[in-house]
Image (tube, helix red, strand yellow):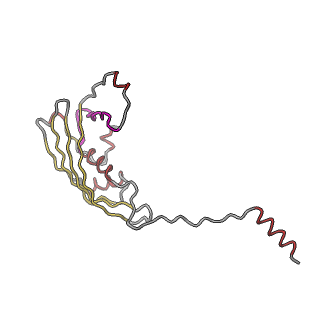
């Protein structure tokens, strides 16, 4: 199964149909929002609107997108619904095939500023919906917590010491 088939929301665009560029305004149906919410472990996804622009570059294509969503997560402390509005932007470089890097680059140390290779389009198709869902997931709070909610660990039960049990036996024995 290809990643496109696993995506909770798919809006495929063939690379050969892009021409000089295209812009798509995207909004999933209620059923698609339900699938996205399940995939992202959300209580609900009430709204998701996106706009994605695809333009050709010298090596491939550039996707520039923006999205706005109203999500409901579950508070990790109180388990109550936690609604929030999320706005995000993303830029992704896409190529048909990945070019090999020179062997000398293997000697370089990787860091945060290292080269990020472009995504490879599968079967000449780029899935705009999958990119929107991926970047929405990156914007979600991984540990949602309602304001003022604090975790209170349960009181630890004090386990009696084996010596306390022996002392109790001795007291019971000494009492007439």
Classified by dominant secondary structure, the portion drawn in magenta counts as: loop
| Magenta residue check for 107 | no
Which of the pair 99/29 is nearer the observer? 99
Q: Is residue 41 above or below residue 105?
A: below
* Magenta region: 112-128
Q: Quadrant of residue 150?
A: bottom left
Q: Quick one: which residue is furthest to the bottom in this view? A: 176
Which of the pair 59/133 is nearer the observer? 59
Q: Quadrant of residue 105?
A: top left
Image position, residue 134 (x, y; %): 30, 46
Which quarter of the rendering shows the C terminus? Answer: bottom right
Q: Is residue 41 above or below residue 128?
A: below
Which quarter of the rendering shows the N terminus? Answer: top left
Image position, residue 149 (x, y; %): 42, 66
Q: Quick one: which residue is furthest to the left in this view? A: 20
**Left or right of 36 in this view: 13:** left
Q: Quadrant of residue 114?
A: top left
**Left or right of 8 in this view: 78:** right
């Amino acid at each position: 199964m290809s990643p496109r088939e696993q995506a909770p929301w798919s809006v495929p665009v063939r690379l050969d149909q892009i021409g000089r560029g295209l812009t798509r305004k995207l909004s999933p149906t209620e059923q698609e929002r339900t699938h996205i919410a399940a995939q992202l472990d959300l209580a609900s996804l009430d709204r998701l609107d996106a706009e994605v622009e695809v333009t050709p570059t010298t090596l491939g294509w550039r996707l520039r997108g923006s999205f706005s969503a109203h999500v409901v997560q579950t508070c990790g402390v109180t388990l109550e619904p936690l609604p929030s509005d999320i706005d995000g932007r993303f830029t992704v470089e896409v190529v048909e095939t990945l070019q090999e890097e020179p062997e000398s680059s293997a000697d370089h140390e990787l860091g945060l500023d290292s080269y990020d290779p472009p995504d490879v389009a599968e079967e000449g198709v780029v899935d705009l919906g999958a990119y929107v869902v991926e970047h929405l997931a990156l914007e979600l709070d991984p540990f949602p917590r309602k304001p003022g909610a604090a975790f209170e660990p349960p009181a630890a039960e004090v386990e009696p010491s084996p010596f306390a049990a022996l002392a109790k036996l001795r007291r019971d024995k000494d009492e007439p």
